[in-house]
Amino acid sequence: MIRPGLALALWAAIAVLVVLNDIVGDTWIAAALSVRAVEWYKALVPLPYVALMAIIHARRTAGPHWLEAALVAALLWPSSTVFVDFLYARLTFDEDPASFLDRFAFWWGAPYSVLVLALFAAPLLAGRGFARGP
């Protein structure tokens, strides 16, 4: 069954965790680590939580329409999380869009794309894992 309210509620939980993780990374962790290490911290720490939210979503939406439900989450979670993360950076550090887009520069080792890809893939993989029916 497709449950957009569930996908939205789980996304809100993910967004809160990502923003709180960014706050911790930008304040306490940044004082002890290099900029690149902080970026890796901010990208890797939310991954288990994203997997947990994807599993919760998949268990609640298992059935013949699991793919549609997983697509709702897979399209909502990455795009809106990137937007919320941009708003955090903009409001906190007055970061311009060009600086924020530098987070996606995977050619120099920026790990932010790993988080965005996980936000996209996790609901699809978990949904397939818990799929029931045809």
Image (cartoon, rainbow, N blue to C red):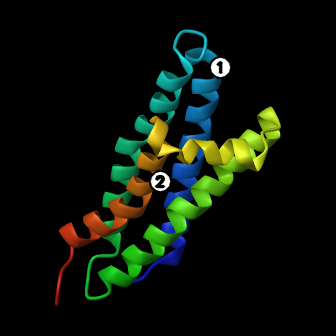
As drawn, which residue projects farthest toward the top? Answer: 32
Q: What residue appears at the point 41 percent right and 47 percent down from the top-left corner?
A: 114
Instruction: Specify whether 115 is left or right of 86.
Output: left
Q: Position of residue 117 (x, y in %)?
A: 41, 56
| Frontmost residue, 4 versus 112 | 112
- Check if mark 1's residue and mark 2's residue have beta carbons within 8 Å: no
Q: Quadrant of residue 119?
A: bottom left
Depicted 44 relative to depicted 53: above or below: above
Depicted 62 relative to depicted 18: above or below: below
Image quarter hosting the N terminus: bottom left
Secondary structure state at the residue bearing disc 1: helix
Depicted 76 relative to depicted 40: above or below: below
Query: Which residue lies under the disc numbered 2?
Result: 116
Query: Which residue lies under the disc numbered 1?
Result: 27
Mark 2 surroundings: few (<14), some (14-19) or many (≥20) residues within 10 A: some
Q: Position of residue 3 (x, y in %)?
A: 46, 78
Q: What residue appears at the point 65 percent right and 19 percent down from the top-left corner?
A: 27
Q: What residue appears at the point 19 percent right and 67 percent down from the top-left corner?
A: 129
Instruction: Specify whether 50 is left or right of 131.
Output: right
